[in-house]
Image (cartoon, grey):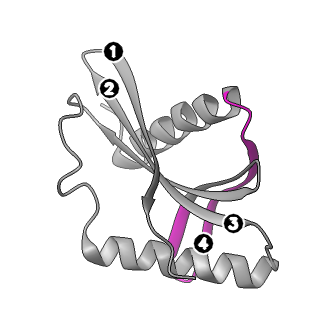
């Protein structure tokens, strides 16, 4: 059985390949600022896109409880730090990709602009 970290990396690889196929351009993976982390950072058209990836062994049913309020706050703080540190002048967007891995069948649900940046 794969560890939680291995499963997380699998979900991120699946999500990244999905986005690259859609012409997103990779900027960073697993970017960290102290205890905050952003799974994938990409450029797409006029946006800088911050992506949180969730992998589950069940099929997607609802967005309820996928991100806690604290998690959302940490992600937005990390996004703000990245934009300031790298002096990014693109429109920020925060997406969620939910990867279902149920009995060997993978399904990707992409939710653009799920979290609204307060920048």
Q: Is residue 91 above or below residue 110?
A: below
Seen from the viewer's position, the closer of residues 48 and 78 is: 48
Is the magenta region chiefly helix, strand or loop? strand
Disc 1: which residue: 105
Q: Which mark is residue 101?
A: 2
Q: Residues within 10 Å of mark 4 (few under 14, many from 20)?
A: some
Disc 4: which residue: 32
Badge 2 element: strand
Please indicate whether residue 79 sits to the left or right of residue 114 in the image.
Answer: right
Upstream in sequence: badge 1 or badge 4: 4
Seen from the viewer's position, the closer of residues 93 and 27 is: 93
- Classify the position of the N terminus by image quarter: top left
Badge 4 element: strand
The reply to whether callout 2 and callout 4 are in contact (CB within 8 Å) is: no
Q: Position of residue 66 (x, y in %)?
A: 25, 54
Disc 3: which residue: 91
Q: Is residue 26 above or below residue 65?
A: above
Spatial separation of the CA atoms under disc 2 and disc 4: 26 Å
> Which portion, as a residue range, is magenta?
22-38
Instruction: Please say whether residue 35 is visible from this viewpoint.
Output: no
Residue 25 inside the magenta-drawn segment = yes
Upstream in sequence: badge 2 or badge 4: 4
The reply to whether callout 1 and callout 3 are in contact (CB within 8 Å) is: no
Upstream in sequence: badge 4 or badge 3: 4
> In the rendered image, which quarter is residue 88 located in?
bottom right
Q: Position of residue 20 (x, y in %)?
A: 69, 33
Q: Residues within 10 Å of mark 3 (few under 14, many from 20)?
A: some
Spatial separation of the CA atoms under disc 4 and disc 3: 20 Å
The reply to whether callout 2 and callout 1 are in contact (CB within 8 Å) is: yes
Residue 43 inside the magenta-drawn segment = no
């Amino acid at each position: 059985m794969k560890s939680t970290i291995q499963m997380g990396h699998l979900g991120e690889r699946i999500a990244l390949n999905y986005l690259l196929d859609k012409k997103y351009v990779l900027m960073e993976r697993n970017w960290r600022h102290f205890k905050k982390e952003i799974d994938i950072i990409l450029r797409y058209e006029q946006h800088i896109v911050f992506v949180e990836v969730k992998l589950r062994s069940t099929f997607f049913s609802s967005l309820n409880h996928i991100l806690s309020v604290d998690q959302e706050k940490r992600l937005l703080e990390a996004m703000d730090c990245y934009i300031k540190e790298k002096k990014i002048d693109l429109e920020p967007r925060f997406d969620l990709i939910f990867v279902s891995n149920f009995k060997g069948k993978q399904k990707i649900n992409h939710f653009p602009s799920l979290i609204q940046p307060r920048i």
